[in-house]
Amino acid sequence: MPVSQMWTVATYVLRQKLKGRKRYPLVLMLEPLYRCNLACAGCGKIQYPGHILKRELTPEECFRAVDECGVPTVAIPGGEPLMHPRIDEIVAGLVARKKYVYMCTNALLLKEKLHLFTPSKYLTFSVHMDGEKEHHDLSVCKEGGYEIALEAIREAVKRGFRVTTNTTVFDGVSSKSVRAFFTEMMDAGVEGMMISPGYSYDKAPDQQHFTGRELNQSMFRKILSNRDPRWQFNMSPLFLEFLMGKRNLECTPWGMPAYSIFGWQKPCYLLQDGYADSYQELLDSTEWSHYGYESGNSKCANCMLHSGYEASAVDYTFSFKGVFAAARAMLLSRYRDPEAARQVAAEKPKSSLIQIDAIAPRHTLKGTEVAVGGKLPDGIEQAFDYRGDVTVTLASGERIEGYIFDRESKADPTASTLRIMTKPGEKVAIKYADVAQISFSGRDMADGRSWEAWIRKYAERKAAGEKNIELVPETID
Ligand code: SF4
């Protein structure tokens, strides 16, 4: 990481501390679109109706969000950001603002789109690589995905771009294989690597390979102990210690806020508990005590996500004890651990088709209706959780069809509001008191049916001896 980047981040954090800000953003997770050219089994980000997947943030909307929160670093996940037709303008505008940009890409389009960008210390391609070839291809559900991404990494490095990798580790992966993969990536010329446990997206097709906290810690202890001195990680060393179970941190989800077509996501990149229209509104209107491991919220119990905990590690670094802890972590970065080494050596090879075997269709509410009355708040919660369009019939008889992306339920129904994004892309607010009926009218994009079909087709074509099978489940109507 360039010294100038470390200096920018350090002075930014110190300024926040001098101002006495308890909650401040460090990295903006800017999601300019949800559309993707992959449909990975462990990702629930693209399970939306077609009209949502077709929408995207304009460059101006992206700049407004970045200017508003004032972060030094912007990560651009998605969806696949290289599918955004104006991604070059977005990146150029952020670089002109001297923001350190990490474009998180699966790299399928990287080689052909590299000419749109200019190498700069402000721009890094953070390539999604989930492990060695076989594991990566299964994880992203595309044979040949590894080779395409690796070729793009080499080309980007050759042309002088900063390149890192971004790896999600799911249950069932072999630590031996992840360690070999680290060496492969360093050999390919990447500047550093990022690593994270599988996010438990509740809409992801594969729900069986997210790990719990203790399992994560023992897995990361094996992966990250006895490090090869060539491995470089583009992450806070204290966050890596947290993953290995050597350090406790509290979640600070406001440190890596997520902004998308719906607004500022509450409370974090992983959970979707509604949206705010500004970063300040996100800070003021989120009940932060309801989230994080210590809160007892079951949705947070197993989370060790970087967007919840890496900002905590950086914040801790700028404390009296934290400076010494970080210095120690950087100087003694091998983490010698004979027991971890023994466990890695004793590991048996794992079955590889872990992601694909596990997918099962889910119960869906499609075709059902919720009537008004005492059941309305519960019905609206179900509709808010539904990954398909609904039709809201108002007491006036008017019908509004679209995707419910936000709701705020208060004791007084006249003060409770839901927000719906209609097919033309309008955000419409509706008072609970005005709702007569809600029908689950659109296709449920998280019901697992497209995945069932995918697995069947995959198995058939594989049995027929076909190579390089590429089957992206139908996600856009
Ligand atoms: S613990 Fe994880 S899921 Fe819970 S608020 Fe923090 S980042 Fe989000």
Image (spheres, rainbow, N blue to C red):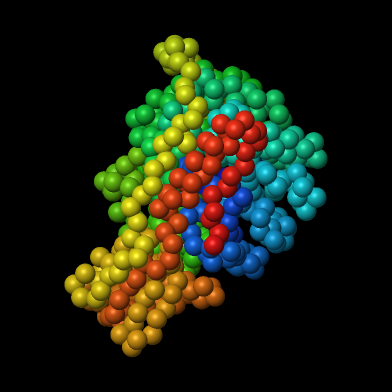
**Residue 451 on image: x %, y %:** 47, 46
Q: Residue furthest front?
A: 464
Residue 250's place in the image compared with 230, above or below, is below
Residue 198 occupies quadrant: top left
Vertical order, 232 against 39 (above or below): above
- Evaluate whether residue 475 shows in this view: yes
Tell me if residue 318 can be seen.
no
Tell how many labels: 0
What residue lies at 35% left-to-right and 79% top-to-bottom? 393
Residue drawn at the location 39% of the way across and 73% of the way down:
391
Q: Residue at x 68, y 44 (%)?
A: 108
Q: Please tell me whether residue 171 is drawn above or below residue 308 in the rendered image.
A: above
Q: Residue at x 39, y 68 (%)?
A: 441
| Quadrant where the N terminus is found in the figure | top right
Q: Which of the two residues, 89 or 16, is positioned nearer the viewer here? A: 89
Name above or below for residue 243 compared with residue 223: below
The furthest residue to the bottom: 396
Foreground residue, 138 or 315?
138
Determine which quarter of the picture holds residue 387.
bottom left
Q: Position of residue 22 (x, y in %)?
A: 41, 54
Of all residues, the one furthest to the left in this rendering is 374
Residue 449 placement (x, y as % from top left): 44, 50
Percent across and percent down for residue 388 are 43, 63
* Left or right of 113, for residue 392: left
Drawn side of residue 171 relative to residue 177, left or right: left
Q: Work out whether residue 420 or residue 276 is closer to the camera in this orientation and state it.
A: 420
Decide if residue 151 is on the left or right side of residue 309.
Answer: right
Q: Quadrant of the C terminus?
A: bottom right
